[in-house]
Image (cartoon, helix red, strand yellow):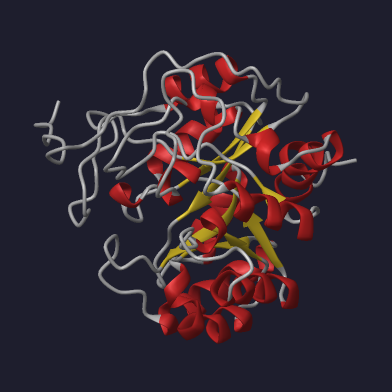
């Protein structure tokens, strides 16, 4: 076994022994945003990574899936693995049709490599524009990748921060594939939900072929309270943003845990209590079914969607 790199100092490991949610997920619910980390001894982390996480492999992910009452997962390539999608693809294959993948690829990726990923269950690529996680996001390279994946019917997952949208939205709108936005475009939740920043994001969604993940309240919150110690009304400062997206775009929203929660600095949430956040942002059974079942099935398993 290769020498294992130590975790980044201060790294918060995922929460062991999560609560059983009080909110019962509808049958067929999809966790549309989660990751796998290694295990490092089997799937080494990329030399160019910005962080070294704990292990969080497929066995732990599938155990959480079953504990929460989730039926399927969409496993998004973690930046600690760079463009080596081996761990993600291994997890998708191991799920036996109950997972799809989102890959990270480079501009020189070949059509044969993309077809192999598609065969394995990959349905999109991720472009990361968060400066602390990537050195650069050259738009011409990304445009090259977008042109290569478009014939497969894949989509593009975008990770950026709200303040950067004005500089990026014209480029995003020019891409030749549907877009899926991570974590509501990371709004500043200290600003008004009907203020200019989040309103601009909502207009961008409305004008383009865009889906929105109403995920990661634990990453967006400023005042909490945290999803810990039995708190089932967590992250009240984030609720208005999630509810606004769900109610304005009920057919284009997705939800995910973000397990194993990379790079959290303040606290590590209990994933069972994160599930109990869902009814606060999707207040009716119809909205919850679209968010958790109908929409992700249409996007990731269209051959099964009804």
Quarter in which the C terminus is drawn: top right
Return the residue found at the far right.
306
Q: In the image shown, does 20 or 254 lie closer to the viewer?
A: 20
Residue under the point 11% across and 34% down:
6
Instruction: Check the image and report above or below for 14 versus 115.
Output: above
Q: Nearer the viewer, residue 140 or 295?
A: 295
Q: How many marks?
A: 0
Residue 217 in view, yes or no: yes
Q: Is residue 58 left or right of residue 54?
A: right
Q: Residue at x 22, y 28 (%)?
A: 41
Image spot of residue 142 (x, y percent): 46, 75
Q: Residue 151: percent from the left, percent from the top?
A: 68, 69
For the point 84% across and 41% down, which residue is it?
A: 305
The answer to whether residue 249 shows anywhere in this view is no
The quarter of the displayed image where residue 30 is located: top right
Q: List x then y, in percent, for residue 62.
A: 51, 22
Q: Is residue 168 above or below residue 2?
A: below
Seen at 55% across and 45% down, the residue is 101
User: Residue 193: x, y in percent?
Assistant: 60, 63
Compared across the picture, whether 306 is left or right of 209 comes to right
Name the image quarter holding the N terminus.
top left
């Amino acid at each position: 076994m290769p020498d294992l790199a130590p975790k980044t100092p201060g790294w918060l490991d995922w929460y062991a022994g999560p609560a059983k949610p009080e909110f019962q997920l509808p049958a067929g619910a999809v966790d549309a945003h989660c990751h796998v980390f290694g295990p490092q001894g089997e799937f080494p982390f990329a030399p160019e990574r910005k962080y070294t996480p704990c292990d969080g492999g497929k066995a732990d992910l599938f155990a959480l899936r079953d504990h929460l009452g989730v039926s399927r997962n969409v496993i998004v390539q973690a930046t600690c693995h760079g463009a080596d999608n081996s761990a993600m693809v291994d997890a998708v294959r191991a799920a036996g049709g109950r997972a799809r993948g989102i890959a990270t690829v480079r501009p020189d990726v070949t059509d044969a490599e993309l077809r192999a990923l598609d065969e394995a269950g990959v349905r999109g690529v991720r472009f990361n524009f968060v400066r602390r996680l990537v050195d650069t996001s050259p738009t011409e390279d990304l445009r090259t990748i977008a042109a290569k994946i478009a014939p497969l019917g894949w989509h593009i997952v975008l990770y950026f921060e709200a303040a950067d949208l004005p500089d990026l939205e014209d480029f995003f709108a020019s891409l030749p594939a549907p877009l899926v936005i991570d974590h509501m475009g990371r709004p500043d939740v200290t600003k008004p939900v009907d203020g200019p920043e989040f309103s601009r994001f909502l207009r961008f969604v409305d004008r383009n072929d865009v889906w929105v993940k109403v995920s990661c309240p634990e990453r967006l919150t400023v005042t909490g309270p945290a999803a810990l110690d039995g708190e089932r009304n967590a992250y009240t400062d984030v609720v208005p943003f999630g509810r606004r997206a769900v109610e304005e775009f009920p057919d284009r929203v997705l939800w995910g845990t973000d397990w194993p929660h990379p790079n959290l600095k303040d606290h590590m949430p209990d994933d069972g209590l994160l599930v109990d956040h869902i009814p606060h942002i999707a207040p009716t059974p119809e909205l919850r079914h679209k968010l958790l079942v109908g929409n992700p099935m249409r996007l990731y398993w269209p051959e099964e969607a009804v």
